[in-house]
Image (spheres, rainbow, N blue to C red):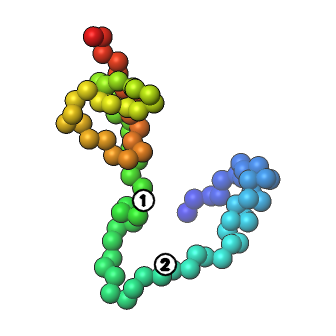
Amino acid sequence: MTSPSPEYRSTRRHALDEQVAAEPPLAPPDLPLDAAPVPVESHLAALRRPIAVAGVVEDGLVRPLDPAVKLPEHARVIIVATPD
């Protein structure tokens, strides 16, 4: 059996932890009875990293030079200027 470790939290942090612990649990989600179970990861937003593509910026619009590049909406893009 391990011995308890000393308390290193500040009084403010301790009070915040107690407040969070005292909150009532969240209600279960309102799902239809025939809903299939899914892993929690499917509910979490996927983190998207910025991508770098060769292109130009014209009047505030990003235009990749390669027409095969398809960017998702609200994508983080780094346009790399090419010397022409």
The image shows residue 83 at horizontal and vertical percentages of 30, 11
How crowded pointer 2 is (Cα within 10 Å; few <14, some 14-19, many 20+) is rated as: few
The image shows residue 82 at horizontal and vertical percentages of 30, 15
Residue found at x 73% / y 59%: 16
Image quadrant holding the C terminus, namely: top left
Amino acid tagged 2: Pro
Left or right: residue 78 versus residue 16 is: left
Q: Residue furthest top?
A: 84
On the image, numbered disc 1 is attached to which residue? 44
Left or right: residue 69 versus residue 48 is: left
How crowded pointer 1 is (Cα within 10 Å; few <14, some 14-19, many 20+) is rated as: few
The image shows residue 76 at horizontal and vertical percentages of 41, 38
Q: Return the disc, 1 or 2, that comes first in the chain's sequence.
A: 2
Residue found at x 33% / y 46%: 72
Are the residues at dot 1 and dot 2 in contact (C-beta closer than 8 Å)?
Answer: no
Look at the numbered disc 1 and give the secondary structure of its residue: loop
On the image, numbered disc 2 is attached to which residue? 29
